[in-house]
Amino acid sequence: MSGGLHACCTGEGGSALVLLHGLAGSHRAWAGVRERLGGVRILAYDLPGHGGSLDFPEAGPAAVAARAVLADLDARAVERFHLAGHSFGGAVAALMALAAPQRVRSLALLAPGGFGPHINAPLLERFIGADNAAALRDSLCLMSGRRPAIDEGALREVLAMRAVPGQQAMLQRICGLIVRDGRQGVLPRDRLAALPVPVHVAWGLLDTVLPVAQARDLPAHFTAHLYPDLGHMLPEEAPQDMAALLDLAIRQADGGH
């Protein structure tokens, strides 16, 4: 590990799309979404403390992750970009948009953290603590909706990541920063409402980690997308639906239909 920030860069095109995974994930969480998006330059990151970015300095807080991704985009000369984040990555994406709204062309938040105080801490801790295929499969099924499709190859990749020395302890540390006394921190709704970019928010009605009630009373210019059969793991559960949502967000922001 180099202590840098890792990104999987694919595709070409004028519109750069930045993808941020959830807690205990990696850029691989977006594999099904990425393969369904054409004509887009995609940068899917391993957030600080995860996967190829395990040794990133001061990894843990969402604010550190937001600053790190923005700095990496600076280094790559990516001035403006479309941005999407899932769960913890959704909170990071929101913080990026708040810090540099002029750089974000569109913002898609999939079951984002920070939209309300309630969080299923025991389930999140069970997911992070899963260190074998059976335990990981069980926790993912609990976090998914009516049509969970647990890919065995993806399971092996997650377990291989967690087997890296220091990774499991880091995930537990980050979880402890997210959840305090059974609750999560809340992003400032007034500042989110003032964002001058189109914002799409997706939520599964069967989300067992972050209640869908947190998608209520969104700012007027936010567009909500609710999915009756889906749970919390939106990019993995429904890559076709999430790719369609991101395609819509990009086309609308770029002046398409």
Image (cartoon, grey):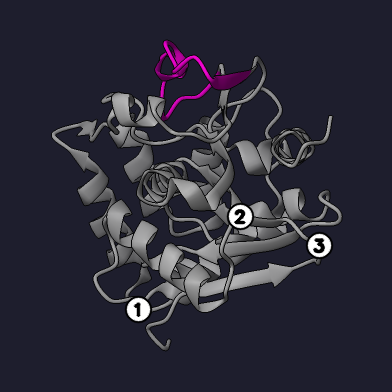
Determine the secondary structure under disc 1: loop
> What residue sits right under mark 1 in the picture?
55
Question: Foreground: 137 or 24?
Answer: 24
**Residue 21 seen anywhere in this rendered image of the structure:** no
Horizontally, is 39 left or right of 88 in the view? right
Residue at coordinates 49% horizontally, 14% vertically from top-left?
A: 220
**Marks 2/3: CA distance?**
12 Å
- Number of residues whose C-alpha sits closer than 10 Å to that of mark 2, classed few (under 14), some (14–19) or many (20 or more): many
N-term mark: 2 or 3 = 3
Q: CA distance from mark 2 to mark 1?
A: 26 Å
| Residue type for callout 3 | Gly
Disc 3: which residue: 13
Above or below, 6 against 250 in this view is below
SS of the residue under disc 3 = loop
In the rendered image, the vertical position of residue 27 relative to residue 9, given as above or below: above
The magenta segment: 206-225
Give the residue displayed 57% in from the left and 71% down from the top: 7
The quarter of the image holding the C terminus is top right
Residue 183: x %, y % from top left: 21, 30
Whole-number angstrom distance, CA of label 1 to CA of label 3: 31 Å
Q: Is residue 186 magenta?
A: no
In the picture, the disc for residue 81 is 2
Mark 2 touching mark 3, by CB under 8 A? no
Seen as rendered, the residue at the extreme left is 181
Looking at numbered disc 2 in the image, what kind of residue is underneath it? Phe
CA neighbours of label 1 inside 10 A, class few (<14), some (14 to 19), many (20+): some
x then y, percent, for residue 72: 47, 72
Left or right of 173? Residue 105 is right
**Where the N terminus falls, by quadrant?**
bottom left
x, y (%) of residue 188? 27, 30
156 horizontally vs 254: left or right: left
